[in-house]
Amino acid sequence: MPRKFGKIVTKPSKSKAKWLEASYITPKDAFDKWPGLSERQTKTFSLGEEDDAAAWLGRQRKLIDAGVWKPTFVVKHDEKAARLTLGEYFPEWLEQRTYKGRPLKAGTRYRLRKDGENHILPYFGNTRLIDITQHDLDAWLATLPSDQEAMRANSLKVLKAVLRTASQPGEHGQPPLIPQYPCTRSLLRPRRRNETIPATPEQVKAIHDAMPRRYAMAVYLAVFGDGLRIGEVCALQRRDIDLAECTMHIRRGRVTADSTKLVDTPKTESSIRDERIPSQLVPLIRSFLDNDVDQDDVAWLFPAKTDASRPIHPNTLRGDYEKARIKAGRPDLRFHDLRHTGLTWLAEDGATVRELMDAAGHSDVETAMRYQHSVSERRVVLAERLGVRLLPDDTVEIVGERIRQLDARIAELEGLRDVERAKLERLKGVRA
C-alpha cells in the first residue's frame, strides 16, 4: 500500500476550526535551486473543502514525481511573466529603478517617465514582455522621426534598460521575467549638429548687465564657479559664500520635478564640491550680499520673485536670461553654456583634465589625484586668471605678481616630486 502523501489539518485547532491547511514536505532537491524554502509547503482551504485540499496534494505529488515541481512563488511569478505587458511593467520598473544603489533624482525619474509615456508605451504598451524581439525594436524605431536622433537614442536607451532589468534575476532571487535580453543592435550615437561656441568676456558682461539686478550675479557665478549647473546656482544660500577664504560651497541643487521638496543633493557625489572665487569678484559679491540678500545664513541668494522663502525656479531664471542673451547678441547661448564657457576658459589657461573634472563636479574619473597640494595651488592660479580675463581692474599688476609667485611655488613642488621619484627609482634598483 503506497505511503500517504502530505496531511490535512484544521486550524487553529479541531475544537475551534476556522480553515483547513494542507501541507507536505518540501522535496529535498529543491533547496539547492531555491535556497530559503520552508521545510513544508502549505496551502489553506475553507472548511468543507477537504476534497479540494486532497486534490491539491495529489497534483503536487504528481509534479514531484515528474520532476517538474516548483514552489508556489515561482509558479505565480511564471504566470505573471506569461501575461505581463510592458505597459504594466514600466511603472513597476521605474519605481524600483536606482543609480548605484541610490534612488533616482526626481528630474531623472521625470525624464524616464516622459520618454516611456511619449515614445515607448504608445507602441509597446499592450505587448507582452516575452514577445518583444529585435525585429519589434526595429519596427518601432522606424515609426520614430528620423530627424530627431537624440530622442530616438534616449528612448531606445530607456527601453533597453527596461528589458535588461526584466531579463535579470530579481533583487531577492526571483527568476527573470523574460528568458533572455532581446536587444542585439544599437543606434549610432547621435552627433551634435552644432558645437557650443563659448562666450567672450565682453558677451558675458553684456548678458550680466542686461539681467534684472536681483539675478545678474547668477551669470558671473555660473562662469566663475568653474561650471555651476543652473540648479546649483538657484539653490545657493548666503552660508555657501565664504569671502574670507574666497570659496563657494556647492551642496545642493534646485528640484524641478518633485513638488514635495525644493532642493536636493547635487547631481552626483562629485558635484558636492568647493569652488574658488577669484579675488576680482569678491567686491561685487560683497556688495551683492550687503544690498540684495537677506542677512539670514540660510537666505537664498536668488529667491523666487513672489516668495523669498523659496529659491528661484530654473525656468524663471532662464526666462530672464533668455531676454538678456538676445540683448547681448548671443541668442544661441544657453544658461548651461555659461558653464561650458567657464570650463573652456580654464582649459585655455592650461587646466589639466583632472582639474577640469574637479571643477565641473564630474564623476567619471576614478583614479585618485596625486600631489593634492600642487593641484590646490594650481586651482588658485586658474581662478585668478579667470578674474583677470573677465574683470580686469587697477590691481592687475598685484594679481599678476601673485600668479607669478604661485607659478614658482608649483614649479618648486613639481621639482620636489621629481627628486622623490628619483629616490624611489634608486631604491628599486638597490632592491633588485
Image (cartoon, rainbow, N blue to C red):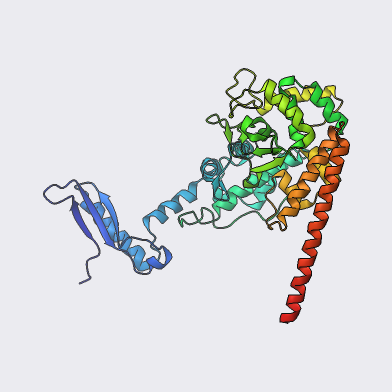
Position above or below: 272 against 261: below
| Figure quadrant of residue 197 | top right
Q: Can residue 405 be seen in this view?
A: yes
- The answer to whether residue 335 of the structure is visible from this angle is no
Work out whether residue 241 or residue 250 is closer to the camera in this orientation and state it.
241
Residue 93: x and y, percent? Answer: 53, 45
Measuring from the top left, give residue 12's x and y in whole percent: 18, 50
Look at the image and tell me in which quarter the C terminus lies.
bottom right
Screen quadrant of the N terminus:
bottom left
Q: Nearer the viewer, residue 93 or 422?
A: 422
Residue 282 percent across, percent down from the top left: 75, 32
Residue shown at 78% from the left, 62% from the top: 416
- Asked whether, in this view, residue 364 is left or right of residue 82, the answer is right
Instruction: Indicate the quadrant where residue 124 lies.
Output: top right
Which residue is at a point 69% across and 20% down the rendered structure image?
291
Task: Kindly give the residue lying farthest to the top in the view shown.
Answer: 306
Q: Quadrant of residue 259?
A: top right
Q: Position of residue 331 (x, y in %)?
A: 83, 27
Give the residue at x 49% y 50%. 82
- Judge by depth and name the residue closer to the eye, 379 or 23: 379
